[in-house]
Image (cartoon, rainbow, N blue to C red):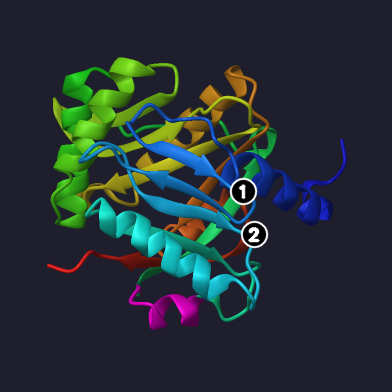
Amino acid sequence: MPDFTTHTDRVRGLFDEQVRRGTARDGTGSEVTATSDVVRWCADGDLGWSEVAWSNLDESNADAEIAQQIEYFAAKELGFAWRVVETDSPEDLGTRLERAGFVLGGTSELMIARVADVPHDDVLPPGVTLSTAGGPGDIDRLIEVHEKVFGIDHSQLRRSLLQQFESSPQVGHLVVAMAQGVPVASSRVDFLPDREFAGLWGGSTLPEWRGKGLFRAMVAHRSREAAKRGYSYVYVIASSESQPIFERLSFESFGTVHTYMWRPPL
C-alpha cells in the first residue's frame, strides 16, 4: 500500500469531493443544496445546522455569492457558518466575509488519518467503561459532558441528535466514558453514505479526567468502528489543544480551517 503522506493532494481532492461537496443528509433535519459555486446546509428551525461547507469562488463572483447566502439565511432568520480552508479561493475570502458582516468564530486544523494507521488500542483506567448504546440516555450523558467542558448550552445539539438517531440511526454513533455511573468524557462519529471518510466530532473530557487516556480510547473506538463499516479514513476539525494528540495517533494536517459566523440582526 502506498505511503499515506505521499498522497496529500489525492486525499485532499477526495475529501473535498466526498465530504465538503457531499450532499447525503445526516438525519439531523438539515437540508443540503449544491450548486457549482457552493454547498449549503440549512437547519430545519432548531434541528440540524447551517453552514456553507464548500465554495468555488473567485474575485469576480465572491462578493455576490456571499451576499446571496446572507439573503437566503436572513429570510429564514437563521445564523450560519462559513468554513474556509486555507486552500479555498479567492485568497482574501475571509476578509470579504468579515466585510460582509461575518465574525471569525475560531481557527482549527483539518486532520485526516487512514483508518489502518490509527492505533486501535483503548486501554481505560480501572472502573471506566465506554457506553455506545446511542439512546436518549446516552445522548443526555454526552450533552452533560459537553456543557460542563465548554460552558455553553447544547440543547439544540441534543434535539438534533435525538432526531438523527430516530430517523437515521445508522449514521450517528456515540461514545461516552462512564466512571461509577457518571459520564466523564464523550464524543461521536458520523458515518454518512457514499464517502470513504468518517467524521469525528465533539471529543471532550472533564478536566479532572484528562491525561488518563480517555480521549485516545474514544478515538481508537471510533476508528475501529469506521474500519468495521468499511471506511478508509477518519477526519476531524481539531482544536489547538487536541491537535497534538491527533498527531500522535497518525493524523496528518490538511490545512487550517477558519470558521466565520453570521447572525441575523436582532
Cβ–Cβ under 8 Å for marks 1 and 2: yes
Indicate the position of residue 90 as horizontal and vertical percent values: 63, 75
Occupied quadrant, residue 138: top left
Indicate the position of residue 100 as horizontal and vertical percent values: 38, 78
Q: Which residue is mark 1?
A: 112
What's the magenta bit mostly, secondary-structure-wise?
helix
Indicate the position of residue 47 as horizontal and vertical percent values: 25, 36
Q: Which mark is residue 254?
A: 2
Q: Is 135 left or right of 199, judged from the image as shown?
A: left
Q: Which residues are magenta?
A: 94-102
Q: Look at label 1 and name its amino acid.
A: Ile
Helix, strand or loop for disc 2: strand
Q: Residue at x 19, y 41 (%)?
A: 156
Q: Residue at x 36, y 36 (%)?
A: 30
Of residue 180 and residue 170, the one placed in the foreground of this image is 170
Helix, strand or loop for disc 1: strand
